[in-house]
Amino acid sequence: MKDNFCVILAGGVGSRFWPYSTTSEPKQFLDFLGTGRSLLQMTYDRVCKVVDKENVYISTNRKYKDLIREQLPSLPESNILFEPSVRNTAPCIAYAMYKIKAINENAKIWVTPSDHLILKEGEYIDTVNRGFQFVAENDCLLTVGIKPNRPETAYGYIQIGENEVDQNLFKVKTFTEKPNVDLAKIFLESGEFYWNSSMFFWSAKAISEAFELYMTELARKFSDGKAFYNTPEEQGFIDKIYQSCTNNSIDYQILEKAQNVYVITADFGWSDLGSWSSVFALSNNRKDKNGNVVLGGRAMTYESHDNVIALQNGRLAVVQGVENMVITESDNVLLICKREEENRIRQFVNDTKVQVGKEYL
């Protein structure tokens, strides 16, 4: 296990859950499921069952330093990678890869988001162990595809090749980003398409070669810092080069272009908790007799059903005569919107930024 590393991506702002999730305390730091642990803490707990704690790294924005230290006090600060600005997944993964490679050139690296829900932990751990084994034995990039159970339009899809390389392991045929509902139905019926979980496995050698081939300029920037990684000069070097990094995703810039991309298909009760509707669907054990889900504070409901009510701790909401709504608040913002129109929350966030001010985000 000494060659196995994990990078947990924890730099997102969770704007789809605004204002319950804010830029100062985003989604991954919140306890959405009433477990007493935030999504990040739950992810870290799972990861540490497979990877040695000293080989677990968190990639995040520097403004979340105090939250990371508070929620993961046993994590060494040297294992926290602070991004000075948001630049999507390619730069932060490149940073993590070059830092880890400077420690162990034989490293096998697992990249996982911090804010996903896993219901079948045993199957999940089996998939992770198989992923590490596959990239240890093959010069490839491996992603995890989740068996779909509905024509979801909010996820990217991976089409598998015709021939099974190993049990539940296939060469990737195509990637498709967020299809419309008609295309998503075709994907579901075909049996060839899986949801893209944004979990990846690769050796340090394979991913560094992919960066050098497909993102040459980015690779040069980070490889120039070989002498600085894991030294007191590391953060200064990262601060210097990060501003010149473009906003690019690892999926678009590398995985959709590389020829050695494989997918391991799985069904371990996965959700990216990407919407209030997904939280509602996964909160059956927290629904009251009228189907209302209450997160954070307390609510008294009258003639109301199938609502999501998300409050700060210690707050009380009294709700009468509404159905299928999202009702959520922070210190200075109250949001009430139709649950079936929650995709407009990003519009509300943008309008608030322009018309009112960033202090409300």
Image (cartoon, rainbow, N blue to C red):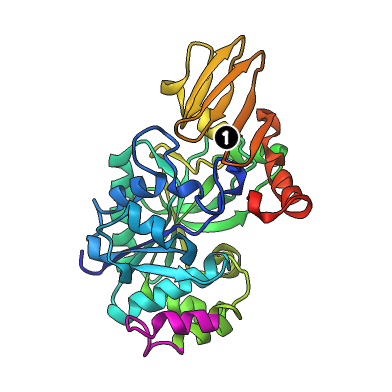
Would residue 329 be visible to someone looking at this image?
A: yes
Residue 215 or 62: which is nearer the viewer? 62
Secondary structure type for disc 1: helix
| Category of crowding for the residue at label 1, using alpha-carbon neighbours closer than 10 angstroms: few (below 14), some (14–19), many (at least 20) | many
* Residue 85 in picture, x, y percent from top left: 56, 69
Q: Is residue 232 magenta?
A: yes
* Residue 156 in picture, x, y percent from top left: 59, 50
Q: What stretch is highlighted in magenta?
A: 224-241
Q: Does the magenta stretch include residue 315?
A: no
Q: What residue type is labelled 1?
A: Trp
Q: In which quarter of the image is residue 36?
A: top left
Name the residue at the right extreme.
Answer: 355
Can you say which quadrant of the picture contains the N terminus? Answer: bottom left
Residue 249 or 68: which is nearer the viewer? 68
Q: Give above or below for 345 relative to 66.
A: above
Q: In which quarter of the image is residue 348?
A: top right
* Residue 177 in picture, x, y percent from top left: 64, 52
Name the residue tied to disc 1: 276
